[in-house]
Image (cartoon, coloured by chain):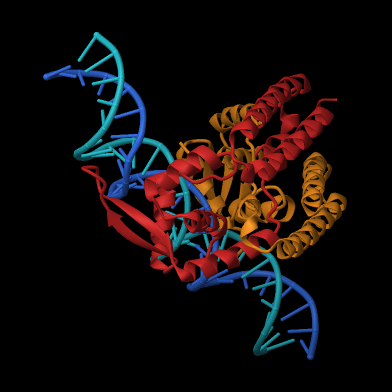
Chain colours: A red, B orange, C cyan, D blue
DNA sequence: ACCGAAATAGTCAGATTTGAGTATAACGAA
DNA sequence: TTCGTTATACTCAAATCTGACTATTTCGGT
């Protein structure tokens, strides 16, 4: 019983607004949510199939014009209930993230200090670049996402503070 | 070419200090590093096998007394080189984490505001509990880890600031 | 001397994830 | 009109990850 819950929550939440076909869901995620979720297209199809299996969504094939068939997903009442449960749990929970770059710091003394400084300075530049990207997203994404972007910006600021402390 | 790099870095870094057998590596990770890496025991065995396949470590079975055989891993010269490359990349890179609980916030308006407040208040308690755990780790873990713990503490503080902003 | 608990040392089937590939349609430029 | 590009819609083999399980040894207490 691994933890798809956020991803399930995401898919159900999107379908709750309106029925969608797979490609559409993936487009939306790629364009609007890529900055805060990690969910590849093929994984989304897999999860939709699972949601269907569990009775949380229905699948209906339809065809527009001459294009290939597509499967339209619609949330079921059971899906609604599940969505609410997942949402409550998600809001009440804190899942500490893992910081992939911590590992390097554990072993930093295996390199000359001067080089470590240079490398971390590069890292700092990358963080700054990421910060800029987030700031530009702030202007183009819908208002629902503002709180999330602020969330990320706060953490990026923390990251910068920390790395500058390391560089000092 | 998915990204095991941090985990590979971790395993090679441990073996760089001293040869170790699988169980020993897992013990060490569980006791000292669980707070900053996510690596299950069976996954570690899998990755060690891969490192062996790629020539970065050698495997030698040995037996102490009557206990079951165990495989002792030792880093090779190629492994050393690889370790340094991974370390340099890791230090220079910034990999933004994903925050699993962001999703809930996107959909928070599907619940009554009062309930959202209660749920987020619970989340805040969980963050505080996590903060305490980190602070107690600070006293028992070796000095190499202090920078990492500070890193986590800074982010936890950022998280608290953000959630309090949401609650206001 | 015997028993239960903990430590030692992994294995493996099954779940999950993804990159690469498949196939058709619409669209614009030359 | 023809040909390359982009959009539409997935599929699937292969890589990855993990929970549950197996099996033996040591050790402390009674």
Q: Is residue A4 above or below residue B85?
A: below
Residue C1, position as x, y percentages in the image: 67, 89
Residue A15, position as x, y percentages in the image: 47, 56
Q: Nearer the viewer, residue D2 or B160?
A: D2
Asked if one can make out residue B30 in the rendered structure from this viewpoint, the answer is yes
Quarter of the figure with residue B24: bottom right
Q: Is residue A63 above or below residue A161?
A: below
**Quarter placement of the N terminus of chain B:** top left
Quarter of the figure with residue B143: top right
Residue extending furthest toward the right: B139
Residue A37, position as x, y percentages in the image: 56, 45
Tell me the residue at 54%/61% (across/down).
A2
Tell me the residue at 43%/68% (across/down).
A54
Q: Nearer the viewer, residue A156 or B54?
A: A156
Q: Nearer the viewer, residue A77 or A126?
A: A77
Number of marks in the rendered image: 0
Residue B12, position as x, y percentages in the image: 61, 39
Q: Is residue B167 left or right of residue A91?
A: right
Q: Is residue A56 left or right of residue B115?
A: left
Asked if one can make out residue B92 in the rendered structure from this viewpoint, the answer is no
Tell me the residue at 42%/55% (across/down).
A19
Q: Is residue C11 left or right of residue C25?
A: right
Q: Is residue A95 above or below residue A37?
A: below
């Amino acid at each position: 019983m691994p933890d798809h819950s956020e991803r399930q929550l995401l898919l159900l939440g999107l379908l709750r607004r309106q029925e969608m076909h797979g490609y559409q869901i993936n487009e939306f995620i790629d364009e609007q949510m890529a900055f805060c979720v990690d969910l590849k297209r093929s994984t989304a199809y897999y999860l939709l199939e699972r949601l269907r299996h569990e009775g949380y969504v229905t699948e209906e094939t339809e065809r527009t014009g001459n294009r290939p068939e597509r499967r339209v997903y619609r949330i079921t009442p059971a899906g609604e209930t599940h969505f609410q449960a997942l949402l409550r749990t998600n809001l009440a929970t804190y899942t500490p993230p893992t910081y992939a770059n911590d590992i390097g710091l554990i072993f930093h003394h295996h390199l000359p200090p001067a080089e470590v400084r240079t490398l971390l300075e590069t890292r700092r530049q990358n963080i700054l670049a990421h910060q800029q990207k987030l700031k530009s997203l702030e202007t183009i994404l819908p208002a629902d996402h503002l709180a999330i972007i602020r969330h990320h910006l706060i953490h990026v600021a923390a990251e910068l503070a920390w790395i500058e402390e390391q560089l000092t």
